[in-house]
Image (spheres, grey):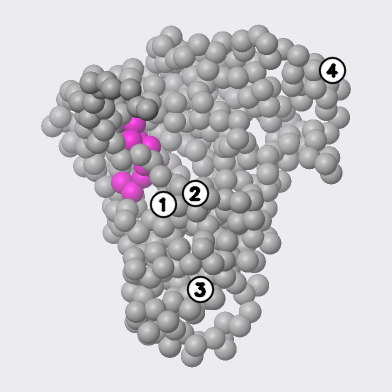
């Protein structure tokens, strides 16, 4: 029997939390039973960047502190103790990775780093550090990563939007951003995603510099480089934080490193900002296993594995760019190709029959791929400038084989039996029988 209480959730909880639209992923709709091909979350399908043996164990590795090499030590006997609160060894390894001296002669040091539970902790920490709830604002450039807006609502902050230029391949609009910053001093943070998500294109260094050089605005520019390791060598601007006191560059080990499961994100920034973030973070926020695995991933032997996996992904990405347009009903790639996914238009009929991007068709393809074919991608058609678009993560060679085959079959079925009745699809099959 339920106890009687005057408790009323609708009157007790914060209004902005009650109104929150949570971040959703494709797996909220389609639960993975282990058999699906998951091309929805931009994970590394080739696995973690570790030198593993045939059984999935770390080569020459051990547990309980008796490893053959320090790089693979996971001390299970030490789990009764809280982890290192400062993570200096890990931070030094991360700095070494990003000290390319391509953008500055200065060097990153551990004092330039905040480590969090995924980049999402850094996103939220920056908001809590610089923005007063109910008063201050952030600026985003849609289409972009949805957690910026979710975290803003959690913190009761307004979001000012300056969309990317959809007529120029999702180019940043620094002049429009600076106009917004000039007119509203309550904007404290600008979030810029590079490579973009879902656009997969790099933002130019000069455009970012134009925002950093705003003559009167007193705020922070956050550059989200979650996918930077799929971009050309030297693309990361992490070391540039030594030149700009209000620049924060976020990165993660979830993507190219294939370590989404350990939940580690970082924020490179000035020592002053890093000190603020580290002062109010939760104590012991990075677990001992996470730290040990991250340190292992940053050793030369395992970095070589990561880079080999990255090359395999790039090879499959290039293959997808060649083969997807051969499928009737697949339109153009929007944005760029500097990441491990492609933003792909789905048309209401084959291009040769005057097909146009269609959310109805894209959503039907998305749903049928997941429900009937076990291939899960991401529908992005509701984002700014992304009409009729699916975001497709690059998988392994075998996964790309299946995706190419199944998307062709699903489009055929949608055109034959869907509301558009596009039997023209069948007229174009002869020229596209083989998807290599």
Mark pair 2, 1: CA separation: 21 Å
Q: Residue at x 76, y 25 (%)?
A: 72
Residue 324: tell me if it is visible.
no
Q: Position of residue 298 (x, y in %)?
A: 68, 28
Tag on residue 66?
4
Mark pair 2, 4: CA separation: 38 Å
Looking at the image, residue 128 sits to the left or right of residue 76; the answer is left
Q: Nearer the viewer, mark 4 or mark 1?
A: 4
Tag on residue 410?
3
Q: Position of residue 227 (x, y in %)?
A: 51, 42
Q: Is residue 321 above or below residue 301?
A: below
**Upstream in the sequence, badge 4 or badge 1?**
4
**Upstream in the sequence, badge 2 or badge 1?**
2
Tag on residue 187?
none
Circle 2 residue: 27
**Upstream in the sequence, badge 4 or badge 3?**
4
Q: Residue at x 47, y 75 (%)?
A: 411
Q: Nearer the viewer, mark 2 or mark 1?
A: 2
Tag on residue 199?
1
Mark pair 4, 1: CA separation: 45 Å
Q: Position of residue 153 (x, y in %)?
A: 28, 32
């Amino acid at each position: 029997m339920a106890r009687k209480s005057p408790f009323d959730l609708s009157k007790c909880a914060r209004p902005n939390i009650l109104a929150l639209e949570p971040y959703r992923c494709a797996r909220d709709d389609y639960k993975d039973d282990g058999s699906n091909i998951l091309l929805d979350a931009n994970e590394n399908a080739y696995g973690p960047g570790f030198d593993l043996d045939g059984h999935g164990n770390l080569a020459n590795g051990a547990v309980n502190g008796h490893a053959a090499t320090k790089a693979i030590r996971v001390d299970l006997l030490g789990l009764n103790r809280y982890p290192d609160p400062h993570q200096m060894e890990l931070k030094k390894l991360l700095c070494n990775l990003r000290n390319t001296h391509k953008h500055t002669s200065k060097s990153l040091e551990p004092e330039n780093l905040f480590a969090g539970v995924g980049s999402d902790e850094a996103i939220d920490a920056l908001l809590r550090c610089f923005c007063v709830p109910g008063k201050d604002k952030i600026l985003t450039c849609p289409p972009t990563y949805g957690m910026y807006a979710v975290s803003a609502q959690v913190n009761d902050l307004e979001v000012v939007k300056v969309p990317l230029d959809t007529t120029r391949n999702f180019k940043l609009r620094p002049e429009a951003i600076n106009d917004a910053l000039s007119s509203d001093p309550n904007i404290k943070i600008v979030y810029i995603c590079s490579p973009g998500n879902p656009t997969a294109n790099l933002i130019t260094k000069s455009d970012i510099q134009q925002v950093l050089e705003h003559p009167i605005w007193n705020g922070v520019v956050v550059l989200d480089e979650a996918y930077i390791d799929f971009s050309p060598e030297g693309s990361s601007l992490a070391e540039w934080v030594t030149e700009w006191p209000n620049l924060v560059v976020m990165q993660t080990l979830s993507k190219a490193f294939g370590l989404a499961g350990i939940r580690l994100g970082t924020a490179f920034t000035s020592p002053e900002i890093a000190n603020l973030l580290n002062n109010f973070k939760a104590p012991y926020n990075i677990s001992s296993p996470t730290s040990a695995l991250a340190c292992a991933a940053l050793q030369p032997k395992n970095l070589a594995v990561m880079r080999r996996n990255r090359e395999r992904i790039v090879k499959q990405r290039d293959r997808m760019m060649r083969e997807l347009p051969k499928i009737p009903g697949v339109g153009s790639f929007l944005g760029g190709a500097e990441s491990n996914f492609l933003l792909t238009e789905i048309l209401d009929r084959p291009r040769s029959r005057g097909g146009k991007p269609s959310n109805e068709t894209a959503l039907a393809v998305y749903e049928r791929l997941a429900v009937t074919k076990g291939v899960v991608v991401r529908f992005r058609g509701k984002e700014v400038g992304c009409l009729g678009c699916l975001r497709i993560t690059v998988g392994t060679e075998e996964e790309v084989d299946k995706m190419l085959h199944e998307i062709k079959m699903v489009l055929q079925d949608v055109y034959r039996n869907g509301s558009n009745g596009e039997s023209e699809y069948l007229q174009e099959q002869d020229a596209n029988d083989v998807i290599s």
